[in-house]
Image (cartoon, rainbow, N blue to C red):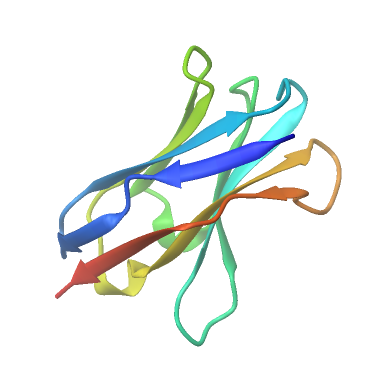
Amino acid sequence: QVQLVESGGGLVQAGGSLRLSCAASGRTFSGYQLGWFRQAPGKEREFIASIIWSGLGTQYTDSVKGRFTISRDNAKNTVNLQMNSLKPEDTAVYYCAARIVGTTSYKYWGQGTQVTVSS
């Protein structure tokens, strides 16, 4: 059974940094794409960044380019999101998700971790 478990959320002041981790288990993720999404109160869930498990191919939404970095640690079976220069508008619940490369829908989702950026 596939499990994605996020950690690393918390409260940080604007301009600060947080590192989120997504622990993936239950199968081999070769051939999968892992993504980070977020959902702020009253807003739709939005795509943040993704990485192919092999490490090749990363994507970012424009609002986080240059501030966030997605990476994976094969030894720990985790996908990480380093978030720098955080802004109050980054406040949201952040979710990790996985899909087979080339498919349209993310099939597996974590439970989310709260990130709050104070001004």
User: Which of the 4 image quarters holds residue 93?
Assistant: bottom left
Q: Is residue 78 left or right of residue 13?
A: right
Tell which residue pokes out farthest to the front in this image. 1
The residue drawn where x is 50% and y is 87% is: 42
In the rendered view, would you say 80 is above or below 29? below
Coordinates of residue 23 in the picture (x, y in percent):
51, 33
The residue drawn where x is 47% and y is 18% is: 76
Task: From the viewer's side, name the closer residue of 63 and 22.
Answer: 22
Q: Is residue 60 left or right of residue 67?
A: right
- Image quarter where the N terminus lies is top right
Q: Is residue 10 left or right of residue 76?
A: left
Coordinates of residue 63 in the picture (x, y in percent):
43, 63
Tell which residue pokes out farthest to the right in this image. 103
The residue drawn where x is 20% and y is 62% is: 11
Task: From the viewer's side, name the closer residue of 103 and 24.
Answer: 24
- Image quarter where the C terminus lies is bottom left
Coordinates of residue 52 in the picture (x, y in percent):
66, 30
Coordinates of residue 82 in the picture (x, y in percent):
34, 41
In the rendered view, would you say 68 is above or below 15? above
In the rendered view, would you say 119 is above or below 70? below
Tell which residue pokes out farthest to the top in this image. 75
The residue drawn where x is 39% and y is 44% is: 7
Task: From the viewer's side, name the closer residue of 89 and 22.
Answer: 22
User: Which of the 4 image quarters holds residue 21?
Assistant: top left
